[in-house]
Image: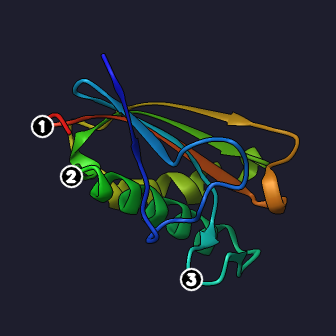
Amino acid sequence: MRKTEIATENAPQAIGPYSQAIAVGKTLYCSGQIPINPATGNIESTDITEQAHRALNNVHAVLAAAGADMNDVVKTTVYLTDLNDFAIVNAIYGEYFEKPYPARSCVQVAALPKNAKIEIEVTARLRDKL
């Protein structure tokens, strides 16, 4: 199966040698999204609430570029630099997904790019091949 790169200006541009997402068949593999504002290229808040919303909005933008949406997500991985933020992030996460919720992992990490407090990566189904 061929790989198709997915890219959008509505999410942060890759800050390394990777793609925002890759579609293979009917599966979309999205790179982790940190809370960078795509218009400025900066993380504009240190508040976990604002960072979680921005990261999830970035995920949504990448999905939309592939013709998918949050209901197509089957698996997420959430990386936090502080698991004490879990309850806040969990509440915000619940605003973006509906039942049946995607499978999810959440782990604490020592650090994230650009000193972000959160990074979210997803795998989603594609309704139509690209």
| Label 3 neighbour load within 10 Å: few <14, some 14-19, many 20+ | few
Establish if 107 lies above or below 86. above
Q: Which residue is mark 1?
A: 127
Q: Position of residue 122 (x, y in %)?
A: 45, 39
Q: Quadrant of the N terminus?
A: top left
Q: Badges 2 and 1: C-beta atoms under 8 Å apart?
A: yes
Question: Would you identify the image quadrant in which residue 12 lies?
Answer: bottom right
Which numbered tag is attached to residue 33?
none
Question: Would you identify the image quadrant in which residue 61 lies?
Answer: bottom left
Calculate the distance from the C-alpha at mark 2 to the C-alpha at mark 1.
8 Å
- Horizontal relation, residue 77 to residue 7: left or right: right
The residue depicted at 23 percent of the width and 49 percent of the height is: 68
Q: Which residue is mark 3?
A: 39
Q: Nearer the viewer, residue 72 or 61?
A: 61
| Label 1 neighbour load within 10 Å: few <14, some 14-19, many 20+ | few
Q: Amino acid at mark 2?
A: Gly
**Residue at far top of view:** 1
Q: Which residue is mark 2?
A: 67
